[in-house]
Structure formats: C-alpha cells, structure tokens
Amino acid sequence: ETGVTQSPTHLIKTRGQQVTLRCSSQSGHNTVSWYQQALGQGPQFIFQYYREEENGRGNFPPRFSGLQFPNYSSELNVNALELDDSALYLCASSSQGGVPEAFFGQGTRLTVV
Amino acid sequence: QKEVEQDPGPLSVPEGAIVSLNCTYSNSAFQYFMWYRQYSRKGPELLMYTYSSGNKEDGRFTAQVDKSSKYISLFIRDSQPSDSATYLCAMRSTNSGYALNFGKGTSLLVTP
C-alpha cells in the first residue's frame, strides 16, 4: 500500500469537455507529479508541484493544468479534451529533501469519446 | 530518439528461470535509476532504485547500473508466476526535481 490515492478510478468524457482528476499524496510527501500513460507505453511526465507551485513541466500543452493544495493533495485539469487524451493518468508523490523515490497511485483511466 | 529505450517484449520464461531486463539511455545527466513493476490496469509499484553506478540486491531482485555504457539491468532470480507483469525502467537527473523518464516497459510472463 503506497498511500497515494486517486479519484475517480474510471471516467468517460466527450471530446471538447473538461475533466478534473484528484490525488492525495502519501503522508509526509510534499511533491506531487502527474504522468500520462497511453496504452502500451511508459508514463510521460506532465508536470510537478511543490509548495503549491508548478516547478517542472513536460511536453504538454497549456490545456493541461494543475493545482496543489496546502495539504499537498493535487488536481489535474484538462480542458478541450481530445480523443488522444484517452490514457491512464498517474499521480506520484515524493518528498523534496527526502528519499529520492516516487510512489504512484493506482491511476485514473480516462476515456474520451 | 527517445532518451530511454526499453525492449517491450513480450518475454516468456518458465517458472524458476533467471530473468534479465534491460534499458539503455542517452542522457549522461541521469543519476537516479529505478525499476517499477506494473500489473495490468494498476499504478506502477517501485521495486528498486540505485544512485549512480553499481549493483543493488533485494531478495530475488538485483539492479545494475553501468553509467559508462549508459545501460541498466534488472535481474530476477527464481522467477515466479506472480512476477508476471510489465517492468518499467525510470531515471532522472539530480536537477530535474522528480520528473522521471520512463522506458516503454517490458511485458514478462512466467509460466508454471
């Protein structure tokens, strides 16, 4: 049990809609990262939040945005959904200044139709 | 060219076999190397991490890093059917926060 929880587990949205995914980080972890994993691929880094600010971003367009809250939980928002956004979205928590490992939640599977 | 290359397999071995999984990478700034195991429709589970070069052993698992060759390996001894999963290598540099660069994953099937 990693302690990282994500909600919802599954979601179906229509192209053009907006979606919000949620993540509660492991106790004691202050950094949250989000990844997109397409079928048959490795996870791709979207962005990372530390102390409620984005401090790293991968090659994703601005319609992917996020938030981190004072309790270190986080949201991933995706606007104007496209069919290619269908994927498993993973949240990982870690601790700046602590152990270097990142621990993942079970993911949210998003299907865009 | 992707920064991390990993043979997707699938790899099928009999129970009890020694499994060797490998990744190559191109970014010499990578310092932290990790192996994750992912079961179908689940999130990745951290198996091992190694800092810089060298070996690390944990039970039936051994991770090796050869920075001179930009090559990392995971060995599984006495493989079990429960080891059947996708194995992902991941790595990052010291100045990239926690942004991990993943391989594509290798699908492993251990048959009884």
Image: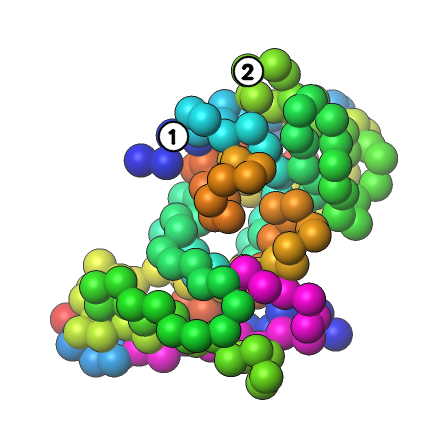
According to the image, label 1 marks what residue? A3
Q: How crowded is mark 1: few (under 14 residues within 10 Å), some or many (20 or more)?
A: few
Q: Nearer the viewer, residue B110 or A54?
A: A54
SS assignment at label 2: loop
Q: Say whether residue A47 is visible.
A: yes
Please determine whether, in this image, residue A71 is positioned above or below residue A112: above
The answer to which quarter of the image holds residue A31 is: top right
**Tag 1 and tag 2, C-beta contact below 8 Å:** no
Secondary structure mostly seen in the magenta stretch: strand
Quarter of the figure with the C terminus of chain A: top right
Amino acid identity at mark 1: Gly
Q: What residue type is labelled 2?
A: Asn
- In this view, which residue lies farthest toward the right? A62
Per the image, the residue denoted by label 2 is: A71
User: Measuring 63% from the left and 74% from the top, which residue is drawn there?
Assistant: B25
In the rendered structure, the answer to whether residue A105 lies left or right of residue A91 reads left
Quarter in which the N terminus of chain A is drawn:
top left
Does the magenta segment cover residue A80? Answer: no
Q: Where is residue A19 in the image (x, y as percent from the top left)?
A: 68, 24
Query: Neighbour class for label 2 at 10 Å: few (<14), some, many (≥20)?
Result: some
Front-most of A26 and B39? Answer: A26
Q: Quadrant of residue B59?
A: bottom left
Q: How far apart are marks 1 and 2 (CA)?
A: 14 Å
- Residue A21 position, x and y percent, is 60, 25
Q: Which of B109 and B95 is in front in this view?
A: B95
Q: What chain is tagged by disc 2?
A: A
On screen, residue B59 versus residue A65, left or right, reads left
| Horizontal arrangement in the rendering, residue B61 relative to residue A71 (left or right) | left
